[in-house]
Amino acid sequence: MIETKTKISKEDILKTLEGVMDPEIPTISLVDLGIVTDINISEDNFVTVTLTPTFSGCPALRVMEDLVKERVLNLDVSGVEVKTTFDVQWNTNMITDKGLAALKKHG
């Protein structure tokens, strides 16, 4: 396990993940699309990110998981796990205002 220097926060993770764009709609981040549905951080800065894709057959799912993992590993964390769940169904109410503007721009 890697020793970390500072306690990471959910806000740090979300800010970092705002730079991970949806592979199919590159004008919107996964955060603004509402796909990042949970972030847990253990005492030793091990991060678990939960994604809820827009639909179960999403062809970009593995790409999104890899992008999230890669981005979070650039932070001062001891490790990261990316989980995908369909426990709660994604819906358009999960899109942020910034995300709605990006979708409008995309067309």
Image (spheres, grey):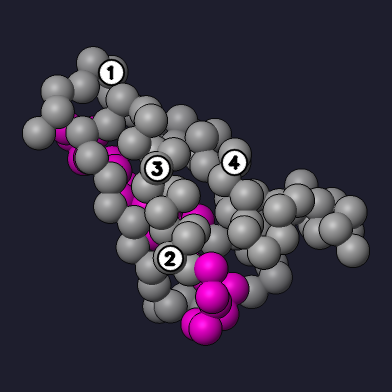
Q: Earlier in the sequence, mark 1 or mark 3?
A: 1
Query: In the structure shown, which secondary structural element does the residue marked by tag 4 occupy?
Result: loop
Query: Would you call the spot at circle 1 few (<14 residues within 10 Å), some (14-19), or many (20 or more)?
Result: few
Q: Position of residue 17 (x, y in %)?
A: 52, 42
Identified at 38% across, 68% down, the residue is 84
The answer to whether any part of residue 94 appears in the image is yes
> Whole-Å distance between the Cαs marked 2 and 3?
12 Å
The residue at which mark 3 appears reads as 70
What type is the residue that disc 2 sits on? Arg
Query: Would you call the spot at circle 4 few (<14 residues within 10 Å), some (14-19), or many (20 or more)?
Result: some
Query: In the structure shown, which secondary structural element does the residue marked by tag 2 occupy?
Result: helix
The residue at which mark 2 appears reads as 62
Find the magenta span and give its range.
36-60
The residue at which mark 4 appears reads as 18
Q: Earlier in the sequence, mark 4 or mark 3?
A: 4
Identified at 40% across, 78% down, the residue is 87
What type is the residue that disc 3 sits on? Glu
